[in-house]
Amino acid sequence: MNFLKKTKVRNGLNSVFVTVFTTAILALFLMPFLYMALTSLKTQSQIAVLGSPIYPAAIPTVVYNGENTGTYTFKVTKGGMQANQIVDMNKYAGKELEVYTVPFKETGETRELALLIGFQKEAIFIDHKNPSADPILWNEGYYKALKRPWIFSPTWSNYSKVWTQIEFPRLLGNTMFYAFVSAIGAVISAIIVAFGFSRFRFPGRDFLFVVMIATIFLPGAVTIIPTFTFWTQLTRLGLGIGTGTWWPLILPHFFSNAYNVFLLRQFFMTLPRELDEAAMIDGASPLRILWSVIIPQSYPAIVAVSIFHIVFAWNDFFSPLIYLASKPELQPVSVALARYNTNYATYPQYIQAGALMALIIPLFLFVVAQRFFIQGIVITGVDK
């Protein structure tokens, strides 16, 4: 009995350790995403303040309504010299004053006061909870080093500003068109090629498959110049399918991709050949077998390939940049965001808001299709 109890306790501790460790790793991976989400909700004034909280917050302010109409004179330091500072309370009527957390060494108390005017070594405050009282001279340091009583205040309007500034609906339409149309070509061509490699026996099949797989190791930079030259020549012919159009981005995906073919071939090879033979006995042609037998059994792998390609196209930056450089109205969100980052480098809240909006659709697709996606990865044993 004692042995069983010890075993249960040990198993329980192991489970707790694994859960805590996994949660810690997950938190580390999610930290950049959390930072992006929090920054996207901040104001420019909060970002400019040193020591501001990491969460979106605002400095509390009060409006002075002129309850005190007196005039006061204080001794303050100006240019290293003591000078008189006259404070006419009538000048502050209707003004918005920032609230600071002000400590007083003599009394040991800390009060939240509204700033009237600040200097390098002194500051003059009023008690906004008792606005008719006399102003308070604080001479214990530089007022900007005082803490602020920040209040949680997300700025949702950042998203609407970015939505308008970069014409996000148009960018979203361009990106979706590029991602989904090219995905159709990539999936259809990969299915046909993978079906041929997995179900047909012909001379040189294995050699051709190895050659195709070898293209995975071909650096993409090697083909940039010849490919770009090819499309430039088509542009000069005036066929309307060269640079400055969607064709250089979409058409190549209708000629298959080694990653997608390999993943689908691995999946097709797990399907029993008896299914094909049974269909052939019933008179089915190869295309009929592909359509009625193979594809219905391969939804997990097909969904995985589709998501792989959509995410690739969604993140594709270089190809749209070189082929659509002269057509900004056709550029997807990846290129437009890079240009936006350059123009609004001093507004990180807008940049993060734009980036967050750009990843919502791929994230939504993954959440919706994650069951098929994970199943396809597990069965084929491929992590692209």
Image (cartoon, rainbow, N blue to C red):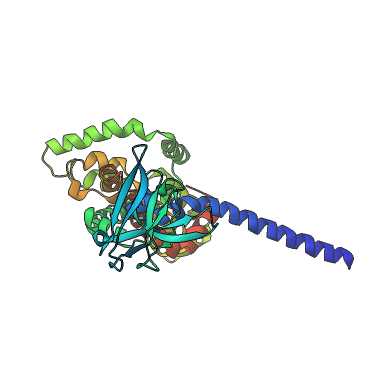
Q: Is 18 on the left-hand or right-hand side of 89? A: right
Q: Residue 346: x percent and y percent?
A: 31, 44
Q: Residue 359: x percent and y percent?
A: 37, 55
Above or below 164: residue 262: above
User: From where the camera sits, is residue 59 visible?
Assistant: no
Instruction: Give 312 or 49, whichever is nearer the viewer.
Output: 49
Residue 169 found in image quarter: bottom left
Instruction: Give 335 or 373, whichever is nearer the viewer.
Output: 335
Q: Residue 124: x percent and y percent?
A: 37, 54
Q: Is 58 on the left-hand or right-hand side of 327? A: right
Q: Is 10 on the left-hand or right-hand side of 303? A: right
Above or below 323: residue 58: below
User: From where the camera sits, is residue 32 visible?
Assistant: yes
Which residue is located at x 64 percent, y 59 percent?
Answer: 19
Which residue is located at x 36 percent, y 35 percent?
Answer: 220
Instruction: Give 273 or 344, whichever is nearer the viewer.
Output: 344
Residue 128 found in image quarter: bottom left
Instruction: Give 142 or 232, whichever is nearer the viewer.
Output: 142
- Split into 4 quadrants, where in the image is the N terminus? bottom right
Above or below 325: residue 54: below
Q: Residue 202: x percent and y percent?
A: 44, 43
Which residue is located at x 24 percent, y 38 percent?
Answer: 322
